[in-house]
Amino acid sequence: MKLTRRTFFKFMGAAGSTVVGRASSANAWESKAPPDSYGCLVDLSRCVGCRKCEEACSTVNGLPAPERANCQCTIFEKKRRPDDTAYTVVNRYFTGKLDTFDKPLPTFAKVQCMHCQDAACVSACIVGALTKDETGAVHYDVSKCIGCRYCMVACPFEIPAYEYDDPITPRVMKCTFCYDRIKKEGGIPGCVTICPTEALTFGKRETVLKIAHDRLRENPGKYIQHVYGEKEVGGTSWMYISAVPFEKVNLPVLPETPSPKLSETIQHSLFSYLWSPIALFGVLGAVMFTSKKHTDHSNRKGGD
């Protein structure tokens, strides 16, 4: 049997399937979402784009003041993303809705880390610098971070940012969910405290979800009948209700399956047993040995 690229992958695929099948049956993936965590609801129909949340966030986290903090017009001419100097930003979208004078009605949307229930960034972090805390926050420990930036690649919302301009002690930067305020002081996130229209509602996640569904039920003609973040990628701590389709305010369409479920199942399947790597290398060795015997036999026949 000649060892070709196709033959090699055929054997490796068969071996891998066997290992995955055996290990996954013994180690089914389980959610690591905390059972009694906090959550925050963003009601886009109430947001007026005042950007007070940006200002409060920068103050609480010691970040630079928001770009053109008092400007509510030209700042919205460009779409912004959270970065290493701003953990949350508000963008303006025109989605086709008109007011009574047929003028376009804007929809404003706050963007920040979603603090996923089963966070892809936590799963991707190879040193445990990112952890899902019982408060619901995806907590970052800079002392453990090695700057691999796998979290940035893994995040389905493209949120984590990196301090590229700091060559000595660069950090991964993102919304902290005001972790210290919630856990150590019993407080609430800074952005929530300052919102003048009560577009932000903070509390236990289950309570916040009930509030969201109550609003949808009581105002069926006002809202899209969906709570964004309730089930997307397994659920998030930040959730949204809206009068316009979520994809029109740059909230991506995502599956309900948690991102780590597939990746961790594969990892656990391959390495949950000590013999798994040995088995794979054993199969490869057998293929090589069989191939060598076939080649030697063919050479001898050719020599005769």
Image (tube, rainbow, N blue to C red):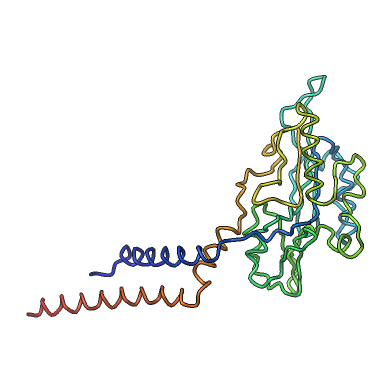
Residue 166 coordinates in the image, percent (x, y): 76, 69
The answer to whether residue 47 is above or below residue 84 is above
The residue located at (71%, 70%) in the rendering is 129
The answer to whether residue 235 is above or below residue 76 is below
Q: Quadrant of residue 12?
A: bottom left
Residue 101 coordinates in the image, percent (x, y): 82, 19
Q: Hey, which residue is sitting farthest front in the picture?
A: 26
The answer to whether residue 293 is above or below residue 48 is below
For the image shown, how many numbered marks are present on the structure? 0
The residue located at (76%, 26%) in the rendering is 221
- Quadrant of the rendering where the N terminus is positioned: bottom left
The residue located at (78%, 48%) in the rendering is 206
Front residue of 159 and 8 = 8
The residue located at (33%, 65%) in the rendering is 5
Q: Is residue 64 left or right of residue 133?
A: right
- Quadrant of the rendering where the C terminus is positioned: bottom left
Q: Hey, which residue is sitting farthest top in the picture?
A: 101
Q: Is residue 290 left or right of residue 204?
A: left
Residue 282 coordinates in the image, percent (x, y): 37, 77
Front residue of 218 and 244 = 218
Q: Is residue 130 left or right of residue 75?
A: left
Residue 95 coordinates in the image, percent (x, y): 72, 31
